């Protein structure tokens, strides 16, 4: 599920087949819309939202391997357990409000029937 959600952060235009593949993976996970939003916001976005930054000199265009996602997401979650990190997380902007991510997530939810 993390790998599918990470695909929402690639720096290229997603095609219909990309969205269908992401939705198919998420449908198989049988996770509700609220839990899906929490996973995207709290687990996946903190790792990959920087790919949308104009300051990123080499944004990822094709996505990340499943192994890379499985390494990076838990590592970021482990780092975010400290008091300072929890405070920072409360103050950071909601990644689901990023215009690119918001539109992509809306399309995936529509495909999921949410």
Image (tube, helix red, strand yellow):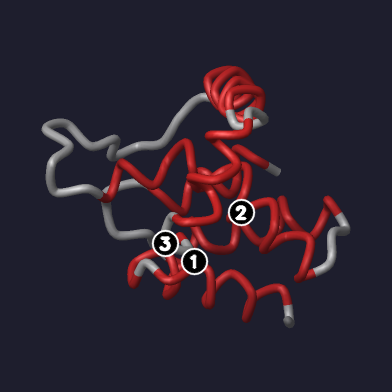
Residue shown at the point (69%, 51%) measured from the top left: 39
From the viewer's side, name the closer residue of 106 and 44: 44
Residue shown at the point (49%, 42%) measured from the top left: 46
- Image height check: is 80 above or below 88? above
**Which corner quadrant holds the N terminus?**
top right
User: Residue 6, percent across and down?
Assistant: 51, 43
Q: Which residue is mark 1?
A: 96
Mark 2: give few (<14), some (14-19) or many (20+) Cα within 10 Å: many
Residue shown at the point (60%, 41%) measured from the top left: 86
Furthest-right residue in this view: 30
User: Residue 19, percent across and down?
Assistant: 52, 62
Please, what secondary structure does the residue beneath circle 2 have?
A: helix
From the viewer's side, name the closer residue of 110 and 86: 86
**Residue 68 disc label:** none
Mark 3: give few (<14), some (14-19) or many (20+) Cα within 10 Å: few
Please, what secondary structure does the residue beneath circle 3 have?
A: loop
User: Residue 103, percent across and down?
Assistant: 42, 75
Q: Which residue is mark 2?
A: 40
From the viewer's side, name the closer residue of 73 and 106: 73
- Residue 33 as seen in the image, left or right of residue 110: right
Between the C-alphas of marks 1 and 3, the distance is 9 Å
Q: Which residue is mark 3?
A: 93
- Residue 47 as seen in the image, left or right of residue 50: right
Sequence-first disc among 1 and 2: 2
Between the C-alphas of marks 1 and 2, the distance is 8 Å
Please, what secondary structure does the residue beneath circle 1 have?
A: helix
**Label tally:** 3
- Image height check: is 85 above or below 79? below
For the residues bearing labels 1 and 2, Cβ distance under 8 angstroms: yes
- Image height check: is 15 above or below 60? below
Between the C-alphas of marks 2 and 3, the distance is 14 Å
């Amino acid at each position: 599920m993390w790998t599918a959600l990470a695909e929402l952060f690639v720096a290229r235009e997603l095609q219909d087949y990309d969205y269908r593949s992401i939705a198919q993976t998420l449908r198989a996970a049988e996770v509700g819309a609220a839990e899906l939003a929490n996973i995207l916001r709290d687990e996946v976005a903190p790792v990959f939202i920087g790919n949308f930054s104009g300051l990123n000199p080499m944004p990822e265009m094709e996505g990340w391997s499943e192994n890379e996602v499985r390494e990076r997401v838990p590592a970021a979650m482990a780092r975010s357990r400290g008091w300072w990190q929890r405070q920072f997380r409360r103050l950071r902007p909601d990644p689901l409000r990023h215009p690119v991510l918001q539109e992509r997530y809306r399309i995936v939810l529509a495909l999921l029937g949410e």
